Image (spheres, helix red, strand yellow):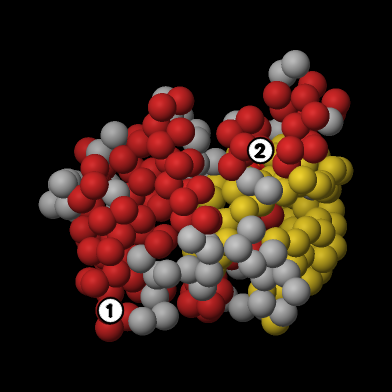
């Protein structure tokens, strides 16, 4: 049974229909990516899962429907969403940002312990725990956004364009962490415009075009697919 399953999910913003019936599934422990051009509906797909856009169709998590639940309830079930642009609180310190992540923890009593555990994963931000988060570099802010999501010990991590605006070495360091989290059993669904990085980091990939899944399968096979190569890899 997949950990996450979407069937015929449609979503709209007022008159604009962003998803036209998206179906996809993610197995427990798997890393999956969603590729697509600007406006294809990648972000909206993640929002449909985390409950932050109005939608129809079926969203199952661990076999149970979650489509009608609030974003808070979905977060408490163990789905953590790291949005595009990170949305960290720039005026607050690194430590305070991590504590906010603990609001959605299934074990709130252990919040500080979880924040310490997360800081061990990110030595670079650990040494800046008292620093205002808005003064961190882009890569450090992305690490902090990931760390804040991990504090709640999610079962499913949703990452929206984590490589956006980061230098290649920082992207590579970020994905090393994601890969090791996945190797330890965390299920990950990643939206990326950096197709090469996403294909390398995941076992399966879906391609979205204009709100529909047009291709899906093992990432290694899609890397060879002509449509993926010409549209997303540039050769
Ligand atoms: P990008 O890579 O540019 O972020 P995306 O694949 O994530 O693109 P979405 O952000 O999901 O695409 O957008 C899908 C469609 O929904 C687009 O046509 C977009 O203009 C529209 N859309 C997204 N957010 C809103 C909004 N808040 N209000 C109105 N339309 C929106």
Mark 1 surroundings: few (<14), some (14-19) or many (≥20) residues within 10 A: few
Is the C-beta separation of discs 1 and 2 under 8 Å?
no
Q: Quadrant of ligand 1?
A: top right
Rendered-image quadrant of the C terminus: top right
Q: Which mark is residue 199?
A: 2
Which residue does the image show at 75% across and 32% down from the upper left?
223
| Secondary element at tag 2 | helix
Alpha carbon separation for disc pair 1 and 2:
35 Å
- Quarter of the image that includes the N terminus: bottom right
- Quarter where residue 38 is shown: top right
Q: Residue beneath label 1, please?
A: 110
Relative to 112, does residue 210 appear above or below in the rendering? Answer: above
- Above or below for 200 versus 52: above
Of 51 and 198, which appears nearest the observer? 198
Residue 202 % position (x, y):
63, 46
> What residue is at 70 percent from the left and 81 percent from the top?
64
Residue visible at 66% across and 74% down? 61
Q: Is residue 29 left or right of residue 148?
A: right
x, y percent for residue 5: 74, 67
The label on residue 26 is none
> Eyeballing the image, is 200 above or below 104?
above
Q: Count the marks.
A: 2
The percent position of residue 50, horizontal first and vertical second, equals: 59, 65
Seen in the picture, residue 22 relative to 197 is either above or below; the reply is below
Report the side of 152 relative to 92 (left or right): right
């Amino acid at each position: 049974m997949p950990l996450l399953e979407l069937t015929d999910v449609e979503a709209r913003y007022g008159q604009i229909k962003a998803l036209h019936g998206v179906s996809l599934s993610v197995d427990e422990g798997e890393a999956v990516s969603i590729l697509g051009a600007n406006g294809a509906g990648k972000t909206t797909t993640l929002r449909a899962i985390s409950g932050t856009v109005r939608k129809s169709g079926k969203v199952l998590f661990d076999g149970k429907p979650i489509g009608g639940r609030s974003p808070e309830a979905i977060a408490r079930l163990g789905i953590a969403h790291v949005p595009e642009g990170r949305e960290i609180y720039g005026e607050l310190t690194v430590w305070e940002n991590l504590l906010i992540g603990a609001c959605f923890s299934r074990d709130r009593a252990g919040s500080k312990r979880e924040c310490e555990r997360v800081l061990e994963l990110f030595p670079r931000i650990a040494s800046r725990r008292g620093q205002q988060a808005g003064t961190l570099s882009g890569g450090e802010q992305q690490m902090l956004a990931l760390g804040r999501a991990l504090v709640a010990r999610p079962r499913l991590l949703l990452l929206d364009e984590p490589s956006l605006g980061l230098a290649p070495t920082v992207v590579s360091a970020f994905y090393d962490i994601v890969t090791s989290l996945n190797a330890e059993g965390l299920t990950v669904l990643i939206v990326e415009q950096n197709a090469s990085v996403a294909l390398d980091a995941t076992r399966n990939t879906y391609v979205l075009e204009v709100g529909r899944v047009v291709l899906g399968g093992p990432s290694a096979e899609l890397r060879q697919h002509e449509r993926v190569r010409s549209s997303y890899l540039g050769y």
